[in-house]
Image (cartoon, rainbow, N blue to C red):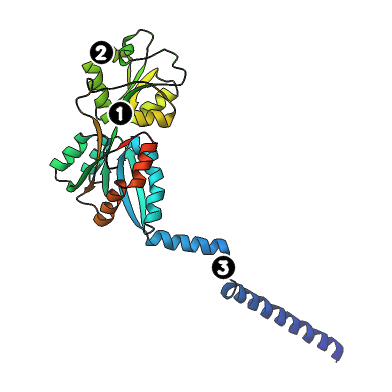
Amino acid sequence: MNFKKIAMTALAGALLIGTAGCANNNKNDNNSNEPMSNSNVAKSNAATDTKDKKELTVFAAASMTEALEELKTEFEKENPNLSLTFNFDSSGTLKTQIDSGADCDVFVSAAQKQMDELEKEDKIDKDTRFDLLENEVTLAVAEGNEKGIKDFKDLEKDDVEKIALGNSDVPVGQYSEEILKNLGIWDKIQDKVTLGSNVKEVTSWVSEKAADCGIVYKTDAKTAGLETVAVADDSMLENKVIYPAALLKNSKNPEEGKKYLEFLKGKKASEILDKYGFKPLNK
């Protein structure tokens, strides 16, 4: 019998078993004892934070996009347990969505009309309703003003070929129609008019020079870097451009919604609204 060969075979088997055991131990150590990386810890904490936050849904006029997005940071800083989700569009579209049962806690309209209708339908908590701010309706052109437009009445001129306005169900469109009818030029310019679904669409067309001019809010003209050539006065508009805000009666987060409305009345909110060209009514 070759004892040397038997001893070598036994030694090789022992080494193989030992190697497998170490591999298994290392695998178990990796699974159970290795600390989480900093990025994994951060992801875990973020997931927990998001899960613990209560989501508040705000429907707001498209013209408030930039201001409310900036205010979101401030509000969430003051209320770390709350997370704001926005739905920006024309007030008419938002009102239709609310009527259709969309989840909404707070509504901020660009006109009293839509809020009045919701109040008549008993869909808002009227005790929470208040007038947040005032805006102005302006005639705006792209930088350079290639057509030399200076006034609303210039829309009649032959060289003004395309005018961007909001639809009739959009507050800025309703204001535009009122202005142009009061000036006696509404019917005369109809073949030049192109209609947008909200004020941001109208603003984009003017910025891109797809239209020679447009009637938009002062704040949207400012945000888009457009030139304001005329501002509607009291002789053109029967009522001021007031934005009301209120809590929805079917809000899933009524106390948090009231807290947000109170925040909008505060000093910080007023400062940021003023920065974007709005006139806060709760200073």
Looking at this view, is 102 or 199 the one in front?
199
Looking at this view, is 130 or 123 the one in front?
130
Q: Residues within 10 Å of mark 2 (few under 14, many from 20)?
A: some
| Disc 3 from disc 2: Cα separation | 70 Å
Determine the residue positioned at 31% across, 46% down. 264
Determine the residue positioned at 40% across, 50% down. 74
Determine the residue positioned at 28% across, 22% down. 232
Looking at the image, is mark 1 or mark 3 nearer the viewer? 1
Looking at this view, is 267 or 264 the one in front?
267
Looking at the image, is mark 2 or mark 1 nearer the viewer? 1
| Disc 2 from disc 1: Cα separation | 20 Å
Looking at the image, is mark 3 or mark 2 nearer the viewer? 2
Q: Residues within 10 Å of mark 3 (few under 14, many from 20)?
A: few
Q: Residues within 10 Å of mark 1 (few under 14, many from 20)?
A: some
Residue 102: x, y in percent?
26, 46
Q: Is residue 38 left or right of residue 164?
A: right
Residue matched to label 3: 36
- 124, above or below 140, in the image: below
| Disc 1 from disc 3: Cα separation | 55 Å
Element at label 3: loop
Tell me if label 2 and label 1 are in contact, CB under 8 Å: no
Whether residue 86 is visible, yes or no, is: no
Amino acid on which disc 1 is placed: Glu
Q: Earlier in the sequence, mark 3 or mark 2?
A: 3
Q: Earlier in the sequence, mark 1 or mark 3?
A: 3
Question: Quadrant of the rendered structure where residue 122 is?
Answer: top left
- For residue 185, the mark is 2
